[in-house]
Amino acid sequence: MWIFGWKGPSGFSARSTAEEVTEGIDGNGLTAIVTGASSGLGEETTRVLALRGVYVIMAVRNVEAGRKVKEAVLKESPSAKIDIMELDLSSMESVRKFAADYIASGRALNILMNNAGVMATPFMLSHDGIELQFATNHLGHFLLTNLLMETMKKTVLESKKEGRIVNLSSEGHRLTYSEGIRFDKINDESEYRTILAYGQSKLSNILHAKELARRLKAEGVEITANALHPGAIATNLLRFHGFINAVTNSVAKFVLKNVQQGAATQCYVALNPQVKGVSGEYFVDSNIANPTNHAKDMELAKKLWDFSVDLTSPK
C-alpha cells in the first residue's frame, strides 16, 4: 500500500485506484488508443476504460500478449469493446503503418493514451538510428500523435465531445542532463547515462504536451493535451537492470503503488469530467502538480517540437 494518501483538490490521492477515479463515468461512445497496452499500466488502463464502456484499441508490439490481455478483460467484462493493432514505437515505419491502417478503418478517436515506454536501457539505437529511449518514449508518440491529429479533430466535430491526448511522463524528468534536452548529442554514446537519458525522454513528454496544448488552443480546437507521472510502480520497465528490478519487486508491497493505483492518474486525465478544458498541465496522483523549470520552458518546448518534426519527417 502506498504510504502517502492525502487527498488533493480533486478529491483523489496517491491511494486512489483507476476504478475509483472513473467511478460513475459513462464512456460509451468514446474510442481510445492505448499504446503499450499488453502489460503493466497499459493493461490496467485498457481494463478500466473498457469497464467504463470505452471502445479500446490496444496498440501493442507483442500481439499475442495483447490477445491474452483482451481475453482476460472480456472474461471480467463480456460486453467490453476491444481490438488489437500492432505498433512498435521504436520504428517510424511501424508508426506510419499503424496510423495509415487506423485512418483507413474509419474509426473515431476521442482519447490518445501515449502510455508505452522503455526505461534506463543500455545505449541502443532504434530502427531509425536514434537513441532508443528518446525514440520510443518521445519521438514515436510525437509522430503517432501528429499522424492521428486530423482523425481526432474530425471526431471532435462529429461527436461534439472534447478530445484528450494523454502523455505518460515521470518524476524522472527531474533527473536529466543539465541542459534539459541534448539536441546535438542525442546519439552520443560516450556521454550516455541511462537514467539521465530516461529523464530526457520523460521531460520531452511534458514539453510535447505543453507545446501541443498551446497549438491546439491557438487553433481553437477542442482537444486537450496533458502529461502525468503515474507514481512509483513495480513494472517490467527495469528489466534491463536485473538486480535493481529484483530489489524493486521485493520491496514493492511496502513503498510502491500497485498497478491499480498506478493507472489512476492516466485514467483520471483521460475520462474524469474535472479535467474538461484543462490542457498543458502536469498531473501527479490525479491532481495538477508542478514540474521542473525545464518542463515549463516554452522556448525549449518549441525547439523540441521543431527538432522532432525534422527527425520524423520522411527522408
Image: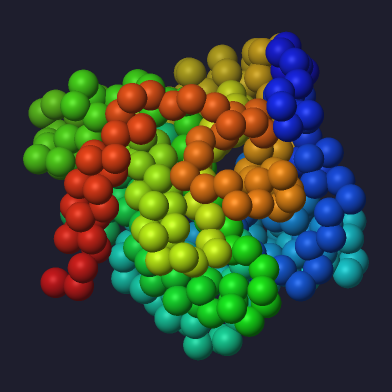
- Residue 175 location in percent, x, y? 35, 21
Of residue 229 and residue 10, the one placed in the foreground of this image is 10
Give the image location of residue 148, x and y in percent: 45, 71
The residue sitting at 39% across, 52% down in the picture is 214
The answer, for residue 195, to whether it is visible in the render is no
**261 on left or right of 58:** right
Q: How many marks?
A: 0
Residue 141 percent location from the top left of the image: 41, 56
Q: Where is residue 278? Give x, y as percent.
A: 58, 47
Question: In this rendering, would 165 be left or right of 314?
Answer: right
* Residue depicted at x 73% and y 32%: 10
Image vertical order of residue 170 relative to residue 94, above or below: above
Residue 313, image quadrant: bottom left
Residue at 73%, 11% in the rendered image? 3
Quadrant in the rendering for residue 84: bottom right
Is residue 5 shown to the viewer in this render? yes
Q: Is residue 221 left or right of residue 192?
A: right
Image quadrant in which the N terminus is located: top right
The reply, left or right, for residue 215 in relation to residue 4 is left
Indicate how the structure is coloured in the image.
Answer: rainbow
Q: Residue at x 23, y 61 (%)?
A: 309
Residue 158 versus residue 139: which sits nearer the camera?
Answer: 158
